[in-house]
Image (cartoon, grey):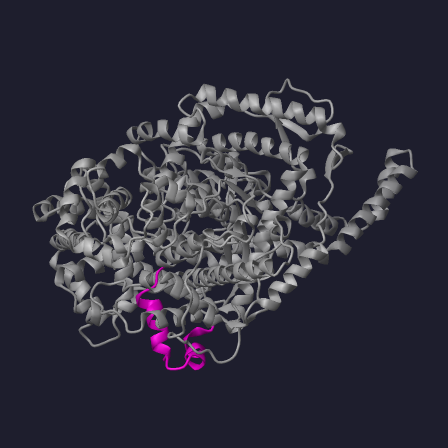
Amino acid sequence: MSSLHETAYPRLRSTITDKELKEYYTPTPEELKLIASEKKPILRFGLILNLKLLQRLGYFVPLASASPSIMKHVLDAIGIKRPITLKQLKDYDRSGSRSRLQQQLREYLGIKPFGLSDQPWLAQIAEHASETKEMLADIINVMLEELARHHYELPGFTVLKRIARAARNKVNEECFREIGRNLSPEAKQKIDELLNPSDGAYSAWNILKREPIKPGNKEVRSYLQHVHWLQTLGETLPEVDVPVAKYSQFALEARSLTAPEMARLKVNKRYALAVILIRQQHSKALDDVANLYIKMLRSMEASAQAALNKYILEHQKQIDTLIAKFRDVLIAYDQDSEKSTKLQAIGSVLGEDASSLIDRCNQHIAYAGNNYYPFMLSNYRQKRALLFNCLDILDLQSTSSDTSGTSLLNLLKSLRSTRSEFINEEALNQHLPEPFDTTRLTEKWRKLILSNTKNDAGEAERLFHRKYLELWLLLHIKHELSSGDLFIPFSAEFDDYREQLVDDETLDEELCDYSEQVEMPLNDANLFVSNLKKELTERSKRVDERFPSNLHASIKEGKLSISPIRSEQPQAELQKLDALITENLPEVSITDILTDTEKWLGLHKLFGPLSGNELRIDEPEKRFITTLFCYGCNLGPVQTAKSVKNMSRKQVAWLNLRHASEDRLDKAITQVVNAYNKFDLPKYWGSGKHASADGTMWDLYEQNLLTEYHIRYGGYGGIGYYHVSDTYIALFSHFIPCGVYEAVYILDGLMNNKSDIQPDTLHGDTQAQSYPVFGLSHLLGINLMPRIRNIQDLLLFRPDNRYRYKNIESLFAGSIDFKLIERHLRDMLRVVISIKKGKITASTILRRLGTYSRRNKLYLAFKELGKAIRTLFLLRYIDEIELRKTIQSATNKSEEFNGFIKWLFFGGEGIIAENVRHEQRKIVKYNQLVANMVILYNVEKMTHVLKGLSREGVVINKELLNGLSPYRNSNINRFGDYNLDMEREVPPLDFGIKILEPE
C-alpha cells in the first residue's frame, strides 16, 4: 500500500507562498513570446499556465485544479485584467486547442509523452529497483528519477503504482522460488511440521516467535533449550541472500501471520517466509544468549561488589581491633631499647592470639583495594553450568589474526569437567598452543589464581586455583565480546562489524563528495590533522588570554569552577499572555485531538496490512485513532474497548498486530513533524538546527530480558531515549535497556531522522562526553555539545607537549597523538561512510568503541580525535556564556518533553505491560506519536488564538512569543467517556497565518 503523498510524485499544494509564486509561476520574457500569436485571452492564459504547471509538476493537469492565487499571479504577469471564469477554464480543458497547445509545450520543453510502448522499459526500471527495495514508494521514486532523466512527461500516479506493484510481485515471486528451490525435502517437512503438527499439538509456529523472559536460572535454561532447537532447525535451511529492506519486510510479514494464515499462502511464499523468520529468530536468539551471558556476569559482579561493601561495614569493628593491636605493638616496641626486651614486650601484647590475628589480617588483605572477586564464587557455583551452556551455543570467533581469545575460550571449555580445586601449570598448558601468559592477570587476580607450592619430589610448583581462573576467563571473554575482538557468526548485534563496512572502491567514490559536504579536507590526512592542530592551538591560546576577564569561570586550587546559569523568571507580560492563551483555548479530549490531527494528515494511510493477503479493514480512520489512543496512552485493549463505544478488544488490538510496525510509526511521526514545521510559531522557539538527546525511564513488569534495575533512576525498566528539536517537537525515539550506555544511541537519532527538520548540533546529557562519541560525531558533521556536570574533574589536552599556558595551565594533562589520527583517518572514514550509506549504525560502532581493547586500533584513533574535539568544545564552554545558555535551554526542552509524554501515558499506572521487546519499542513510538500530534494540535490552536488576540489589540512581540511552549495540557481532558465523532467538520490546516506582520 502506497499513497501519493509518500512518494516524490509532484502535486499541487493547497497553499502557495509569495516566494513560490514569484520563483515558479512568473513567466520569463522568452516564455511570453510563446503566447504572442494567440489572440484569445483564454488561450494565452491557458498556454502560459499549462507551461508553468508542466515545469513545476512534469505532467499536465486541468487548469481548474490550479489554486486561485496561482491563476491570479499568472493573469497579472501576462497583463490580462479581466478574471477568467470557471466555465472558461472547463471549456478550454474540453477544447481541441488544449491538445494542440500541449504538443507545442512538449516540443518547447523537449519532453516526450509517455505511452503504452514505453511501459516495458519502465517496467524494467521498476524490476531493477525492486531487487533492492521493498516499499512501493521507494520503487516509484526510482521510476520518477528515470522518467525525469529521460525527459518523459510523467504518467498518472495510478499507472506508476500498477507498474511498481507488478514489478515488485515479479521480483518477490522469483526470490521466493529461489529460496524454495534450495530447500531440501527434509527442510520442507520440518517447516510443514511447524505449521501443522502431525499429533495435533500446539503449533510450533508460535513457539518460534518466543522471546526470553526474566533471566532467572530456570528461565535461562529453558530458553537455551529453545535456542538449541532453533539452531537444529536452521541447520537444514539454505543461506538467504536477500537485500536488507526485503529481508526486514518479509520477516515482519511472517511474524504477523498465524500458522493457518501461513498455510493458506502460495507454496513458495510460505516456505520463503518461514525460512526468513527462522533465520531472523535464530539471529536474535544468538544476541539474546550473548546478552544473557553478559548480564549474568555483570549481575554477579554487582552482587559481589554489594557483598564487599556489606563485608566492610560488618567488619569495621574487626579492622579497628587490628589497628588497635598494631598500635599496642608499636608502643611496646618503642618503650624498650634492648632487642630482647622489645621482643618480650611485643610477645606479651600479642599473647596467644598471634595466629588468629594473622588469619584476620590475611582475610582483610584479600578484600583490600576494592577486590570483590572472592565474593563472586558463591553466585558462580549456581551460574556455572548456565554460563558454559551459553558458550556452547555461541560459536565465538576472533576478528583478527590474534587468536589468543579463542585459545582461552578452548582452555575454559577444557576445564568444564574438572573438579579438582587446583591445577598445576603443566596440566593447564596442555590445552594451550603456548604457555599461559600470567602477565595478563592483574595483581588482584594474580593473588587469587596463582599459588606456589612444592610437589612430592620437593620441587617448586605453581598451581592455579581453578574456580578463580574460570571466573577470570569468563570475564575476559565477556570483555572481548563487548569490545568486538570476538564475534558471533549470524548474530545481528555481535557479528563482525568489519564485514559491514564499505570496501575501498566505495570509500574512494564517496569520500570526495562527502568531504565537500562537511567542509573538511578528508582526502588529505596530513592537511586534516594540521587544520585540527592549528584550530586547537589558536583556541586554547585565545581562551588563555581572555580568562582573566572571564567573570563566570575561575580556577581554585587547580580546579575549574564555573558559575551556574540562573534561570530567568518569566516576565509579567509573558505570564499574562500565557493566561490569555489558556483562557481562549477550547477544552478538548485526547481522542478529539487525535481525530482532528488524523483528519488533517490522513496518517491511517501509512498503516496498510503488513501482509499482502489481507483485505483492508473497515473504518480505517476510526480504527487507527482507537489503536493510537490505546497504546500511546497505555490504556490497553480491554480498557480502551470499555472507554470507546462500539469497539471490541480484538478490533483495538488487530491494527497494532497486523498493520503497525516501528518503521510505519516513524513515518507517521515524520509526517507530523513536517506539518508542525510549516507553522510560523515554532520558528520563534528555535532554528531547527539544534536538537537535544535525553532518556527517561519507563517502568516495565519484571519478566523480560530488557528489564533491569537502573541505579540512576532507582527502579526496574527500560529507557526511552528521545531526540527533541529546539522547536520542541520530538524527532526520533529509541527504547533501550537499562545499564546500556545511553550515549551509544546519541547519533542514531540524527542519522535516522527523515523529517524536514535536520539539526546539525546535538546536545546531550553528561553521558555524551565519551571520547569516541566526540570523534565520530565530528567526522559525521555533527557538532556535539553536551551539558557538562563535574567540569572540575574533566581534563583538557594540549596540541603539543611543548605548549604551556599562563592562566589555564592546571586544566591540561598530556597532549594529543595527532600522528595516530593521521595514520588511521582512512579507517575512521570507512566507518563514517558506512554509517552514511546505511551499511551499519552509529550505535553498533559505538558499542564496540565503548570498551577498550588493546587490539582495536580504531578505538585508539577515535579516542585521540575525540580528545581534540572535546577539548575544543570545553574551551568554548569555559569561554562563552551564551553557548552554555544555549545548551541549558536545549536540554531543558528535552526534560520538559519527558514530563509531557509521561503525562500523556496515563493508563496502566504508567507501566508498560507488554513483555515482547518489539511491542515495547512500538509502545514508546506510539506514545511519541501521540505527544507530537498533541503538540501539533496545540500549535495550530495557539496560532489562531494569538492571531485573534493580536487583532483585539493585545501587545504581542517576538520576545513574548519566544517564551511560550506547546507543552500545554490545562485544556486537555484525559479521562471519561471517549466518543469518536468521525462526522465532525474539522477546518483544514492553514500554514500561512503570520502572528506578527513582517518587518
**Which residues are the magenta region?**
635-661
Evaluate whether residue 411 shows in this view. no
Horizontal arrangement in the rendering, residue 703 relative to residue 74 (left or right): right
| Residue 910: x %, y % from top left | 53, 69
Tell me, yes or no, whether the highlighted magenta stretch contains residue 648: yes
Residue found at the far left of this picture: 117
- The residue at 68%/61% (across/down) is 576
| Residue 244: x %, y % from top left | 28, 48
| Residue 960: x %, y % from top left | 64, 52
- The residue at 21%/70% (across/down) is 261
Residue 486 in which image quadrant: top left
Residue found at the far top of this picture: 802
Q: Nearer the viewer, residue 230 or 88?
A: 88
Q: Nearer the viewer, residue 320 or 853?
A: 853
Q: Nearer the viewer, residue 368 or 903?
A: 903
- Magenta part, dominant SS: helix
Evaluate whether residue 755 shows in this view. yes
| Residue 283: x %, y % from top left | 32, 53
Tell me, yes or no, whether the highlighted magenta stretch contains residue 659: yes
Q: Is residue 92 above or below residue 981?
A: above
Q: Is residue 822 above or below residue 689?
A: above
The quadrant the C terminus occupies is: top right
The quadrant the N terminus occupies is: bottom left
Q: Nearer the viewer, residue 706 or 456?
A: 706
Residue 878 in which image quadrant: top right
Q: Is residue 913 above or below residue 547?
A: below
